[in-house]
Amino acid sequence: MRRFFLVFLALFALGSSAVAQAKHPFTFEDMMKLKRVEEPEVSPDAKWVIFSVVDVDLAANTKTPHVWIVPTAGGEERQIIADQDADRPRWAPDGKRFAFISTKEGGSQVWIADFDPAAGAVITTHKLTSIVTEAGGELWSPDGKNILFTSDVYPECDGAAQAETDCNARKVKAAEESKVKALIFTHLLYRHWNAFREGKRSHIFVIRAPKEGPAADSEDESIMENYPRDLTHGDYEAPVFSLGGQDDYAFSPDGKEICYTSNHDKNPAASTNNDLWIVPVSGGQAKDITADNPASDSTPLYSPDGHYIAYRAQQRPGYESDRFRLMLYDRKTGEKKNLTEHFDRWVGDFAWGPRSSSIYFVAENGGESWIYQKMLDGSKREKTPGYHFESDILEFSRGFNDDLAVSGPNSTLLFTRMSIERPTEIHSLSIDACFYAPSICDGAEPPLFPKTAYSSTALTHANDAVLSQISIQPLEPFWFTGANDDKVEGFLVKPPNFDASKKYPVKFLIHGGPQGAWGDDWSYRWNPELFAAPTAATPSGYVVIMINFHGSTGYGQKFIDAINGDWGGAPFEDLMKGLDYTEQTYPFIDKNRECALGASYGGYMANWVLGHTDRFKCIVSHDGMFNAESAWGTTEELWFNDWEFKGTPYDNREMYRKWSPHEYAKSFKTPTLVIHGQKDYRLDVSQGFDLFTTLQMEGVPSKMLYFPDEGHWVLKPQNSQLWYKTVNDWVDQWVGK
């Protein structure tokens, strides 16, 4: 028997080894096969979760979203809209329909899917809007009567619903047919992020929701006169521009009012004074409910009982990286309350808990994004091992979490989770409102709180098959003493098939923001696992090192503020000391083969490194600031530069010159790859051209990768493929082998 057991162990070991050997290093093609899971939406009966999944077709150079579904109780996830692109699904209150966005006909429009709750299947789909300025960002009103959506329209077309629709249609047609494509600007923010505004403003519209089923629409003659109504008239962005995350608008629970974010300052290009406005769905004068705060107020969300509006606010005008606080507005009294006064982290996505008794929110913390719960009654619980209490704020779940949604009155929290080893999947976590607020449960005794009660369960497994074939390394944190003798965190990723006895070249990644951070999260644009993987020229792979220097988020507001007016100071010191620490601590690092790579602020810092040290064998500078003075005049969000450099170039020129990489061009020696996109309006393409020209004139080995069809980010699949290949080839050329 013992001999049989030993033979079995040997066979098992051989089998396990074969499985391990079958795994291959992560490749770009693997990354393009991954399904990109997006925010979950829970059905009104709490039985289903619908969500978008973006599929990438590398050969066709496309990204296509589809709607998928999974039971909240667990089970197989499956696609339910396959014959057209379908994005951002949102449930109707009856749970028998949901709205979504599709470009199948007439550009981006709102569509309706009729849904069978018993089978969890779509019966049919039909288009709701046909607005010539296109539609996005739809929401179904809680009373089921209306659907909200956003559209970029001409503000001068303000008027009655039909007249406004016709006016916009005429202006769009005239612009399309005109042989002259010139634009005339009368105010700033004439272009933003990656597009010219062309005289349009984002407005919020409502349209009557259709009766159940497409047949009902055709039988209702009045549907032909169901023109969308503009609720946010005027020459203002309403809602304001957003790069994603929580909506900047919401319906009241009775469906009679909306709250939205808009900035009415005379020069919004230099202002962060976003305010919350409320307006009846029937139309009328909008009311500013946060006019007393000259800084940003955003992401409103009504409490289920209708008593409050929760939102995020900052306190310092003009500073986009001030601490985001969770606020509460009493709709009856107008009183405002800061719910996170003593919580020194940025409040991110949030959701109301059962019975309006608490709010769940996410906040970055040391390279992760944790879920917290804020009790509105101020109740506190006895500390339980493994869980951290901050006054009446409970640390609820660790990891890198986002996109919160609460299912049912007393049951489940849905959210997305990712890590450096795995892209986004949807998770569920059982919650019990009675435990946290027994007063709302008729005095019932709360249940015991076992230590393992709040471990989450993955509802989706969209990428298990692909990831099971890939060798991926975990993120390894380390701490060192940085600038000002502060403790600074860094991270390291080893290559697949790592051998501690070998020496490895280094890719030293510098994050953007600058108020951003590296962490245990997934990225398609700057993926550390892909950077660590072997290349044809460097089959052993690379060690990837990342430092969360002063200015990084997740370590408290004082740490974030340290970078203001000190762009090349403490952050540069942190980066150099962090690299010194890894060279001294990890014997497998080859300090003679290191390359620094960064984008956005990381591109700026790459340019700064270029003029301040020769320790790197190569540099990659993507969309980086090169000339701080000229960058001010060619960017769109002027509040950013004004704050970070403490004024304009003509009011505080010495600050701009002190921290401008171009001032140190005579020290440039390191071979540098420059990358920039023509449609990057955060950091104009001229910054990249200026850098490349300077490198060439100074005789520094250099190359430029120019994208005429990309903005601040490289998003098209084949452009991304070229980006990774060009970057990796450049690094291989100088530090590989």
Image: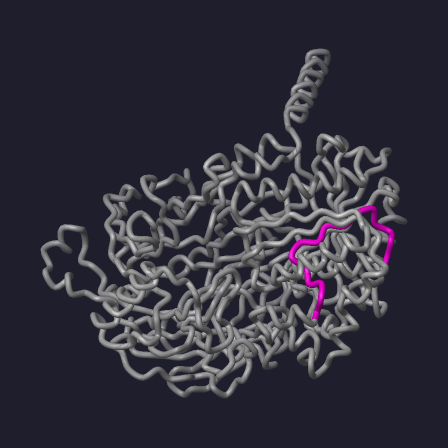
Count of residue discs: 0
Say which quadrant the N terminus sits in. Answer: top right
Measured from the top left, where is residue 88 in percent x and y?
39, 54
Q: Please name whichever residue, 732 or 338, is drawn nearer the observer in this view of the structure.
A: 732
Residue in the image at 24% along x and 43% along y:
123
Could you tell me which residue is drawn at 37 percent across and 46 percent down? 67
| Residue 214 image position (x, y, % from top left) | 17, 51
Helix, strand or loop: magenta stretch: loop
Does the stretch in magenta take in 302?
no
**In the visual, does 418 lie left or right of 577?**
left
The answer to whether 8 appears left or right of 566 in the picture is: left
In which quarter of the view is residue 150 placed?
A: bottom left
Magenta residue span: 613-628
Residue in front for this viewpoint, 682 or 321: 682
- Name the residue: 55% across, 51% down: 708
Q: Position of residue 227 (x, y in %)?
A: 21, 66
Q: Could you tell me if residue 412 is visible in this image?
A: yes
Q: Quadrant of the image for the C terminus?
A: top right
Q: How is the image coloured?
A: one colour
- Residue 650 horizontal side relative to residue 154, left or right: right
Q: Is residue 615 magenta?
A: yes
For the question of whether residue 367 can be seen, the reply is: no
**Whether residue 677 is situated above or below residue 361 in the rendered picture:** above
Q: Residue furthest front?
A: 179
Residue 198 at x, y percent in the picture: 42, 67
Location of residue 497 with respect to 416 vertically, above or below: above
